[in-house]
Structures are given as C-alpha cells and as structure tokens.
Image (cartoon, helix red, strand yellow):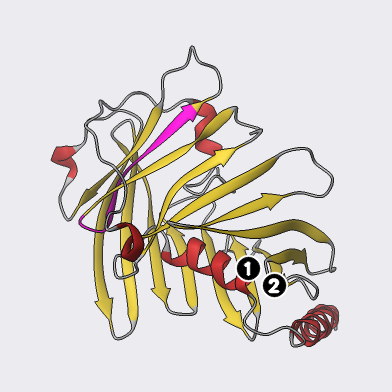
Amino acid sequence: MELLGKNKTFFLTVITILALSAFATANTCTDAYFNAQVHGVFDQESNLRIDSIFYSQSPAGWNGRKFFYKNSFVEKVVIDFRDKEEEPSYYIYYRDTNETVLTKKGYEYIDSSYKKQDTLFHHLKTYYHGEYEYTQIIRIAKFYYSLQIINSTPSEFSEKFVKHDTIVEIRNFNYSSDSSLVTKAFYIADLNDDYKCNKFDEQQNLIYTFTYIPNENGFSIRTSEGSAPYHIETFVINTEKTGTTALRKTVKPVKIKPKARYFDLLGRFKFTK
C-alpha cells in the first residue's frame, strides 16, 4: 500500500507538471538545454558542441572547462582552477584502443561507440591514475538519453527524455540492489518567457532556473540557483555556423586534483563512492 501511495503521488505530480507545460509549446530554453546536455558532447552526428563551461563561482574553485574535439569526438577537457597557483587538469579520451595508451595521470577514458537503429551507444571505460574504476554506457537518441554506470559501487542508471515541452529526468542509484534510491526532476518551460525554463523536483520545489542566450556562433545556457549570487554558463557552438568544433592544441596531461573527482563532465555534482 505504501508503494502504491508513492506511485500515486508521483503520477499526480507528473500530470500536474505536464499540464502546466502544455500551455507553452516549442520552448526555446528546454529545447536548447536538452540539445546541449544530450547532443553537445558525445553525439558525433550532431552539429552542436559544448565549447566551454564558465563558473562565476564554483564550489570546487574552478574558473571553467574547455572542450576539445577531433573528428567530431571529444578528445580532452581542460579544467582551469581559480587558484592561479594550481595547474590546469585534464580529462583525456581515447578512441577504440586499449590500456597501452594510458599515461596513468589523472582521469583517462577509452571510448568505444556504435549505432544500433536510431540510437548511438558509447562505452567509456574510466581510469584514474591508470587504475580501472568503472564503465559508463551512454545511449543517445533524438529525444532520449541514458547513462548507466556499471562495475561500480554504487551503481547508477539515469535517463532524460522529452515529453511535450518538458524534460523528465530519472536517476536511480544502487539500481541493482535492494537499497536503490530513485530521484525524479522536471525541466519545464517558463510560461511568460520562451528563453527561460526551470528545474523542479517531485515535490515541485524549484531547483534551478535556466536562461537561453543566443549568439552568433550558437548559444549559451545560464544556470542559476534561487537567489544565489553565482551562476554557471555553458557555451555551445553550432559547427554549421563556425565550420569548426574547438581549437586544438597539444597539452601535457597533469594530475587531476582530488576535488575534481566529485563533479561530472558537465560540472554537476556526481553521486560517487
């Protein structure tokens, strides 16, 4: 009966939120946010690329991240720290190879990808200082994205999909155990501003506000939290407009700082062991 009650509450929440979102159609903000998050890094068939992420004030002390690509695949991500005495750190990605390429410095990924029907798959084996940690399985379709983390404690399975003008996000921690924890969130168009959208939890509490900002090379998404005086801004390049993905330069990988381990590729806090 308790489970039925929880499901009923969630069902009513979904109905309420989708009903509210039905008043706005083709909201630019939700569309841009979904495209940036889902198609901006690992979708090699997309013309969109996340170029950089700027933190006006980061809990990890970062200035931002710069993304570099080669042949439409992410090659490395450079993390610039606010403390000028700290050297930048790097996430390095290798394509369809084996462990012999690892430098054993910081985070490194071996990425194998393939397409099945209309879905792209990426299998990313994750290494930290040369030691295997876990594998990420990413699935990307036009209106769907999922991330599954295996060979890890805790395990995780998360999904994002578009329903009408709303993005539904479901995250399941410890999904393969009896102690699983499921959280749900909804990204909903602002009824009064086509360039804004909001993230709500299951109880319809406002978590984040997003602002879509177009520019000559693509657009950016600015993320703010309540009345907090800081924000995160993600800059996305439309390669059809620029004719390029991101400037490339040769850099020497250095040690990833421990504090960088608690945030994912897009700068969001990650549930980790």
| Residue that extends furthest to the front in the rendered view of this protein | 216
Q: Which residues are magenta?
A: 71-80
Q: Is 78 inside the magenta-drawn segment?
A: yes
Mark pair 1, 2: CA separation? 6 Å
- Residue 158 on image: x %, y %: 55, 66
Dot 2: element:
loop
Query: Is residue 269 something that shows in the picture?
Result: no
Front tag of 1 and 2:
2
Q: Is residue 104 left or right of residue 202?
A: left
Q: Nearer the viewer, residue 164 or 114?
A: 164
Magenta stretch secondary structure, dominant: strand
Q: Tell me if label 1 and label 2 are in contact, CB under 8 Å.
A: yes
Dot 2 corresponds to which residue?
A: 194
Which amino acid type is marked by label 2? Asp
- Residue 272 on image: x %, y %: 56, 45
Residue at left offset 67%, top offset 58%: 211
Q: Quadrant of the C terminus?
A: top right
> For the residue carrying disc 1, how many other residues have a C-alpha within 10 Å: few (<14), some (14-19), or many (20+)?
many
Dot 1 corresponds to which residue?
A: 29
- Residue 77 on image: x %, y %: 37, 41
Q: Quadrant of the N terminus?
A: bottom right
Q: Is residue 80 left or right of residue 123?
A: right
Q: Is residue 11 left or right of residue 146?
A: right
Q: Is 141 inside the magenta-drawn segment?
A: no
